[in-house]
Amino acid sequence: MDRIVIEGGKPLSGRIPISGAKNAALTLLPCALLTDEPLTLRNLPRLADIDGFGHLLTQLGVSITVEGVRRGEFGRVMTFRADNDAEPVAPYDIVRKMRASILVLGPLLARFGQATVSLPGGCAIGNRPIDLHLKAMQALGAEIELASGYVKATAPNGLTGGTISFPFVSVGATENALMAAALAKGTTVIENAAREPEITDLVQCLIAMGAEIEGMKTDTLTVHGKDRLHGATHAVMPDRIEAGSYACAAMITGGSLELVGAREDTMHAILAGIADAGGLIEFGKNSIKVTADKGIKPLSISTAPFPAFPTDMQAQFMSMLALASGTSLLTETIFENRYMHVPELARMGADIEVRGRAAVVRGVPGLVGAPVMATDLRASMSLILAGLAAKGTTEVNRIYHLDRGYERLEEKLSAVGATIARVGGEG
Ligand code: EPZ
C-alpha cells in the first residue's frame, strides 16, 4: 500500500493551485441523470471519488467523454450523457466504497420513476444514516422499501411537489431533494435546507439546465418542477476545504502560501479562524495569501453547518493548534466519531484530550516525526500537516484516504518547498 514520507520543519512558501471542489463535483455528476442531453462539467478534480462516481454513472447507462484541461483552469472537462436506458441500480460493491453514491437516488427516481440503491453503511467518522434522504423522497410521493441492504424507491407516476422540512441540516439530503424536486410535478419547498457553497453550486448548475429554483443561499429553497431539463456546461467551484487545508500548512510551518483560485465568499469562517490564530491574510484578484505571522494563537472553535466553521476543517485546525501558544478547545457537533486523528497526533507529541464531542488541545513547543496511520480523509490531511511541521521523518500510511480528496498533494506541496514523497508499499 502506498505511503507518504515527509521530512518536516521547513517553512512553505509559494503558490498552490486550488482544484475543483470534491463535494461540489460529487453532487454535480448525478445531475447528468436528470436529462438525456449532454452535461459538460469543467474544472473537475482528478480524485479517486470522482473516478468512482464516473464508474457508477457508466453502470447506470451514462456515456462519458473526457477532454483536456482548459487554459487557466486546473481541472478536467468531462461530458456526461444519460441517453440510454440502463438498470437504475447502484450496487453495494460501488456504494460501500463511496457513500456519495446515494446522490443518484433523487435523480434516478425523478427521471426513471424508480431507483435501487445499496444502503451506504457507516464509515470511520460515523454511522452516516440516510433517513432524511428517504423522508425527502417520500415527501415527493415516492414509495420506499428497504430489503437486503438496498433501498428500493418507486414513483410509477412520477414525483409530485411537496414540503420537505428537515429537522436538522443535511448537505446530502438537501442535494437529493433538490435534484428530485427539479423534475417533480408542481412546487416543492425545502425548509431548513443546507446552505453550504456546494449546494449553491448545485442550484446554479440545475438552473443552467432549465430548473426553476428560488431562495438560493438561504435555508428555504422553492423548486418549481419541470417536465424535463436540458444539457448545460458548468464549472465546478474551487475547493474551500482544500484551500483551508493549505492555509493551515502555511500556519503550521511558519510560512506563506498563495492559494490560487480560492474564493473568499466560501471561506469566511475558515479565514476568520486563521486570522484569530494569528495568520496574516491578503486578498489578490483570484487568490488568497496566508502568512504565518509570529506563531499560532490558541482558539475555541465549534463545528456547525455553513456559514459556521466546517466540520471538514476540524482535523486540520487541530494539527495547527497542537503548536499554539496556549490551550485550545475544539467541539465537533456534526459527526459522532471525528477524532480518529487524535491518537495519531499524540504519537507525534501532540497533547490532546478528548472529552465526548470536545477536544482540549494543549499547545506544545514542537512535534516529532513518526510512522502514523490515516483513518479517514480529513484525518489524513491533519497527519500530513503535522508531518510538515514535525522535526524528523513522518510516514503516513493508508493514504488511499487522502487520494479521495486531495489532488496531486505531493506535487503541490513539493512546489512550495516541502520534502515529501509517495512511496509504494509492500502488500
Ligand atoms: C457532506 O456529507 C460532505 N460530503 C461531508 O464531507 C461533510 O462533512 C458533510 O456534508 C457536512 O458538511 C459530501 O458532500 C460528499 P450531512 P453528508 O448529511 O451529506 C446526519 C469530507 O470530508 N444525517 O450534512 O453525508 C449525519 O450522520 C466529507 O469531504 C442523518 O442523521 O453530511 C451527520 O451527523 C466528510 N440522516 C449530520 O446529519 C441523514 O439522512 C450531517 O450530515 C443524513 C445525515
Image (tube, rainbow, N blue to C red):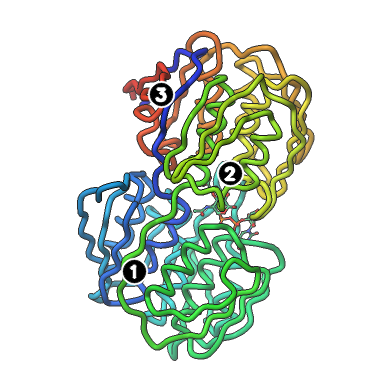
- In-image side of 357 versus 397 (left or right): right
Neighbour class for label 2 at 10 Å: few (<14), some, many (≥20)?
some
Q: Residue at x 66, y 47 (%)?
A: 335
On residue 357, the disc is none
Q: Is residue 58 visible?
A: yes
Q: State which image quarter holds ligand 1.
A: bottom right
| Amino acid on which disc 2 is placed | Asp
Tags 1 and 3 touching, CB below 8 Å: no
Q: Amino acid at mark 3?
A: Val
Which quarter shows the C terminus?
top left
Question: As rendered, which of 114 and 256 lies closer to the eye?
Answer: 256
Q: Earlier in the sequence, mark 1 or mark 3?
A: 1
Front-lying residue, 81 or 10: 10
Residue at the image point whose x is 52% and y is 66% from the top: 175
> Which class describes the residues within 10 Å of circle 1: few (<14), some (14-19), or many (20+)?
many
* Residue highlighted by disc 1: 32
Q: Earlier in the sequence, mark 3 or mark 2?
A: 2
Image spot of residue 59 (x, y percent): 28, 62
Q: Nearer the viewer, residue 215 or 256?
A: 256
Q: Quadrant of the N terminus?
A: top left
Tell me, for residue 312, which label it has, or none: 2
Q: Locate residue 248: give its quadrant.
A: top right
Say which element carries label 1: helix
**Which residue corresponds to mark 3?**
416
Vertical side of 122 occupied by 298: above or below: above
Disc 2 under 8 Å from ligand 1? The reply is yes
User: To which quarter of the image does residue 90 belong?
Assistant: bottom left
Residue placed at 66% from the left, 19% from the top?
294
